[in-house]
Image (spheres, rainbow, N blue to C red):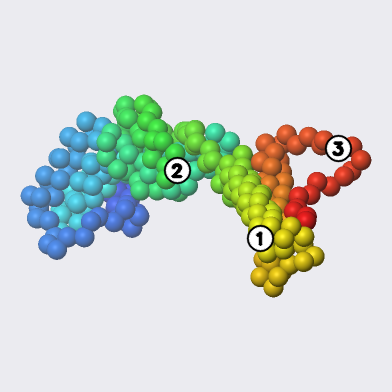
Amino acid sequence: MEDRVSLRQRAASLALLLVAAFFPRPARAVEPTKQECVEANERAQALRQQESLQAARESLALCLASSCPGPVREDCADRLAEIDRVLPTLVFDVKDQDGRDLTGVALRVDGKLLAASLGGAAVAIDPGSHQVTFMPTVGPEKTESIVVHEGDKARRIAVVIVVPAQPPTLIDPPGRTQPVAGIVVGGAGVLGIVVGTVLGIVAKSTYDSAVTSECGGNASHCSGAGLSQISSAHGQAAASTASFIAGGVLAATGVTLWLTARQSVRAAPVSGGGVLSWGATF
């Protein structure tokens, strides 16, 4: 009988040393008194009955202090080892709808933040029913109800969070920028044609006025002033022709931009392949 008691005491001492090595108690400025050690042990027992295993574990770590009586330390070590055997741990496998791992997912259990970022490691949770909320950096939060059992070790829980697709960024959205450019360029072309028309009318008026008032109705018998007016009329006519040509090119370009933006370009061959031109001649 004595050998059995001695063997049990040695085993308890060894367990105490192992527990103290792997589960260090929180640092304290002052070692607990004998009464505090006893109270910590009793409090841990009550917490164990309530299945508050993590709180019981913290209380038992207190009564492992060297200032606690030997029998109390041994009892706390035994209880702590038993709690560590049954304390559940879960591994959350969080993926998106395409099966890709989601990183930086925070975990909240029953409204309290348990992990700022799940990194694949097992998470200790007390037994019982829990509301578990997953908070990804991208995408909506997801809350699930789970039941955790004593003795669950590294139990894997798969979670799928639907992450909304990010719309592509278009530098030149079809049907938006190009039609606007077509309108601007086409408008400039129309303006050029209008200016060419006005210049043609002015040139014709200047020429007719010079011939009538300064040349006696014959352009071959003009005075110096008449020749000067006729020369000015020719300059206006040249500007009119240039404006017509530039306006026609711009207008055609604007129409092309407008049509190609909507992918509805239709070729309309011109019979004879002729080129339309405008100008004023005298």
Percent x, y for residue 76? 23, 46
Q: Which mark is residue 138?
A: 2
Which residue does the numbered mark 1 point to in the structure image? 213
- The quarter of the picture where the C terminus appears is bottom right
User: Residue visible at 20% across and 56% down?
Assistant: 65
**Mark 3 falls on what kind of element?**
loop
Percent x, y for residue 46? 17, 34
- Disc 3: CA contacts within 10 A as few (<14), some (14-19) or many (>=20): few
Please name whichever residue, 36 or 1, is drawn nearer the observer in this view of the structure: 36
Please report whichever mark, 2 or 1, sits nearer to the chain's N-terminal start: 2
Q: Compute the Cα span from label 2 to label 1.
A: 84 Å
Mark in front: 2 vs 1 = 1
Which residue does the numbered mark 3 point to in the structure image? 269
Please name whichever residue, 53 or 278, is drawn nearer the observer in this view of the structure: 278
Please report whichever mark, 3 or 1, sits nearer to the chain's N-terminal start: 1
Amino acid type of the residue tagged 2 in the rendering: Val
